[in-house]
Image (cartoon, rainbow, N blue to C red):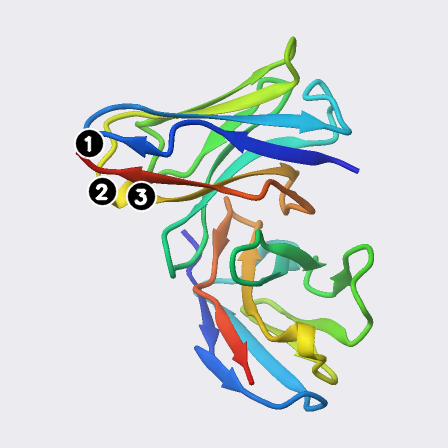
Amino acid sequence: QVQLQESGPGLVKPSQTLSLTCSVSGASVNSIAYYWTWIRQPAGKGLEWIGHTHISGDSNYNPSLQSRVTISADTSNNQFSLRLTSVTAADTAVYYCAAGRDFWPYWGQGTLVIVSS
Amino acid sequence: EIVLTQSPGTLSLSPGEGATLSCRASQSVRSNYLAWYQQKPGQAPRLLINRASSRATGVPDRFSGSGSGTDFTLTISRLEPEDFAVYFCQQYGDSRTFGQGTKVEI
């Protein structure tokens, strides 16, 4: 059973960089079975796929965020991370990490990130 | 980008009743690559259905998915109290996008 746990700052200032980490247990980020994914959800709204990375080197991002997003894996710590640059209030959301390929059976509990000065 | 439109926005029903949720795509979803999720307040989404009609592990058989092309349906045959939640569809035929959700309330 894959388990995921997000961590990172809950408050980020506008124009700065949002950085989150997802710790993985029950699977290895080296596994070819999973694409390691970030998804977000503004309060009271729908879900938005941010992007994913795979051990093969295949990383793919939402075109609307592509210029600001990097998702990478840290095999030594069995984690993967999200970096989102130049944030604005519109980036305020609950951020989920997830594992799967094209759909996601495994999710973290989510972490709220507020963008505010 | 494929836009998914879910209807209705809210469905008011009672336990024991059946529910029919719709997800319509702005263009045909390749190979019926469509999934359904359930989300309860304060929780992460839970995968129910993939490939339009394949139930995920542990999902009760009162949940069923159907459809193809641009029109997909999630049916809950008899609502249990724990089924009152928000349901999202998601396509993975062309990148990945979600519908805006349908709330099933008592």
Give the crowd class for mark 3: few <14, some 14-19, many >=20 residues within 10 Å: many
Spatial distance from mark 1 to mark 3, Cα to Cα?
A: 10 Å
Q: Name the subunit of mark 2.
A: A
Give the crowd class for mark 1: few <14, some 14-19, many >=20 residues within 10 Å: some
Query: Would you name the residue on which mark 2 appears?
Result: A89
Image location (x, y in percent) of residue A5: 60, 33
Residue drawn at x 53%, y 81% is: B105
- Marks 3, 2 in one chain: yes
Residue drawn at x 52%, y 42% is: A110
Q: Is residue B95 visible?
A: yes
Check whether the beta carbons of the residues at disc 3 and disc 2 lie within 8 A of each other: yes
Hey, what amino acid is under mark 1? Answer: Pro
Hey, what amino acid is under mark 2? Answer: Ala
Residue drawn at x 78%, y 63% is: B59
Image location (x, y in percent) of residue A34: 69, 32
Query: Would you name the residue on which mark 3 appears?
Result: A92
Q: Is residue B99 above or below residue A15?
A: below
Residue found at the very far top of the displayed protein: A76
Q: Secondary structure at mark 1?
A: loop
Hey, what amino acid is under mark 3? Answer: Thr
Q: Secondary structure at mark 2?
A: helix
Label annotation for residue A30: none
Spatial distance from mark 3 to mark 2, Cα to Cα?
A: 5 Å
Is B75 placed left or right of B87 in the picture?
Answer: right
Spatial distance from mark 2 to mark 1, Cα to Cα?
A: 7 Å
Label annotation for residue A14: 1
Check whether the beta carbons of the residues at disc 1 and disc 3 lie within 8 A of each other: no
